[in-house]
Image: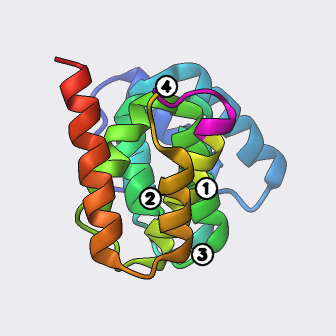
Amino acid sequence: MDMKINNSKDLEIKNLLENLVSENGVERKSARKNLVKKGPVVIDFLMEHIHHPKHLYRWEALKTMEEIADPVSVPLFIEALEDDESDIRWIAAEGLIKIGSESINPLLKTLTKKTDSIFILAGAHHVFHDLNKNNSLPKDFPIDNFLSNIKKSESDEAIKLLAFQILSNLEEENK
């Protein structure tokens, strides 16, 4: 870990990050709990683990971020929806769900560009399905049509167009 240490808080976070990827599950859980208590300030430190080749590093970093549930993590969760490991993608989707409505526009923007990824489509379906179940979607969100189009995934262009239309409508409502 080549993290620059500026003060005692940084050193404490660095030590927690080392324990976060320990072979000892109890140490990992304790480190995660303590990192979560520190809040969004640790997200910058966790970013290095999100791109780590070892599964455990990515899993623990994303799980910690999911528990923090800060909107600054949204782009990182969206990126993790394309991870090769299904449990990493699941945690990323759960993180977006936990963040709630602040995940909607960034995920729609992703869908206007990346409908060729089966993982993005599956993650978006998971997220929007659960946001709907949690009543976290805007009242006029065409959820049934949207989920149906994603599930079929017959046409990338149809999904891109629908995501773009929903995004435009949401932006218009917020003016």
- Comparing marks 4 and 2, which lies closer to the viewer? 4
- The disc labelled 1 sits on which kind of residue? His
| Number of the label disc, if any, that sits on residue 155 | none
Q: Earlier in the sequence, mark 1 or mark 4?
A: 1
N-terminal-most mark, 3 or 2: 2
Confirm or deny contact between disc 3 and disc 4 (CB under 8 A): no
Q: CA distance from mark 3 to mark 4?
A: 34 Å
Residue 139 has which mark? 4
Name the amino acid type tagged 2: Ile
- Dividing the picture into quadrants, the one containing residue 103 is top left
| Few, some or many residues within 10 Å of mark 2 (<14, 14–19, 20+) | many
Looking at the image, which residue is at 69% across and 36% down?
Answer: 133
Left or right of residue 67, residue 73 in this image: left
Residues in magenta, as a range: 131-139
Q: Which disc is residue 85 wearing?
A: 3
Residue at 48% in and 63% down: 81
Q: Main secondary structure of the magenta part?
A: loop
User: Is residue 134 at all visible to an observer of this figure?
Assistant: yes
Given residues 75 and 65, the one toward you in this image is: 75
Percent x, y of residue 8: 41, 22
Badge 3 amino acid: Glu
36 sits left or right of 76 in the view = right
Q: Quick check: marks 3 and 2 in contact, CB under 8 Å? A: no
Amino acid residing under circle 4? Lys
Which circle's residue, 3 or 4, is located before the other in the chain? 3
Q: Secondary structure at mark 1?
A: helix
Mark 1–mark 2 Cα distance, whole angstroms, equals: 21 Å
Nearer to the camera, 114 or 17: 114
